[in-house]
Amino acid sequence: MLRRSAAVAVLVTGLLAQTAVADDGGPTVGNDGTCEGSMVSVTLCAQDPGSPGGGGGNRPGPAGGIGTGSSSGPKCTYEKADPQPPPENLAWPGRNPGEGSIYRVVCDDLRTGVVWLPNGAAPPAAAVDPEVLAQRAVDAMKLKGPAVASPRTAGRYTVGVPVWMWVDQESPTRYGPVSESVTAGVVTVSATARVTSIRWSMGDGTTVTCHGPGTAYTSGRGMKESPDCGHIYARTSANRARERFTVSATSTWRIDWTVNGGAGGQLTETRSTQMQVPVRELQAVGR
């Protein structure tokens, strides 16, 4: 059974060359038996079961992992140790201190360790996270809230009379589809966004979710209700600020993205638009 130090769970695989770990009760790696004050504060340098790679000489790959080369691998940062460990420290892989330097490695999957790099060699480049690029593509789209055509602030609405809600679709940034691509190194993420639903908060405590832009009202519709996106007010807005209901339309954007034209993922964004809507009672004049 391999034994782990209490200080750190796992050492980045293969970064210490030809270093063994004994069974419980055996010696540990470091400058003393407890690893206190040691540059090498872990006792495990063997490969975790089921982890990729194997054998000696593995180096952090392009994705910051352990030679896997996968963009979905752990993301690691490298910091040159200052001061450098003494020559007798097992962090040195049979090299002279003058030939290179020891770097601390910390990965976002909680693994940590050390690696030797020759003089003049830069640490492996930080991994490109495709989802980060996808979010940058979304930011470049400049998505906006829906272009509400009805209800309108200048409109006149009445208790008990159907209100038809719909939005204009002329602007891609307000309804979609809209596409952008972002490239970092050899990774290109292409994303396309489109509105999948609009949630209307009517100001009277009710909400209506419409899965589409809604249907525009025409005079020939008379008192009919909207076939896909409508509301009927049961009370007036007389007791509200400026005697108007604050209505908000919140669109949900689905963003589908791909990496180099292949597999990818999906993001979700929301954008809102508000308007002030007056709702009155129908006044009847008797004889």
Image (cartoon, rainbow, N blue to C red):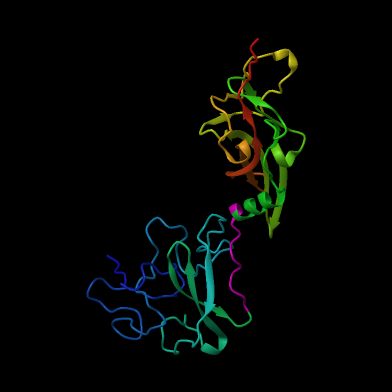
Query: Residue most toward the left?
Result: 25
Name the chief secondary structure element in magenta: loop
Front residue (pair 162, 16): 162
Query: Residue most toward the right?
Result: 170
Q: Position of residue 37 (x, y in %)?
A: 37, 85
Q: Position of residue 50 (x, y in %)?
A: 40, 55
Residue at image x 62%, y 27%? 280
Front residue (pair 151, 170): 151
Say if residue 33 shows up in the picture.
Answer: yes
Q: Position of residue 148 (x, y in %)?
A: 69, 34
- Write the start and end of the magenta stretch as one range: 121-131
Magenta stretch: includes residue 130: yes
Residue at image x 65%, y 34%? 277
**Residue 20 appears in which quarter of the rendering?**
bottom left
Query: Residue most toward the front?
Result: 287
Above or below, 40 relative to 219: below
**Residue 215 appears in which quarter of the rendering?**
top right
Front residue (pair 5, 66): 5
Q: Position of residue 137 (x, y in %)?
A: 68, 51
Magenta stretch: includes residue 139: no
> Is residue 157 shown left or right of residue 79?
right
Residue at image x 53%, y 63%? 75
> Is residue 56 shown left or right of residue 244?
left
Quadrant, the C terminus: top right
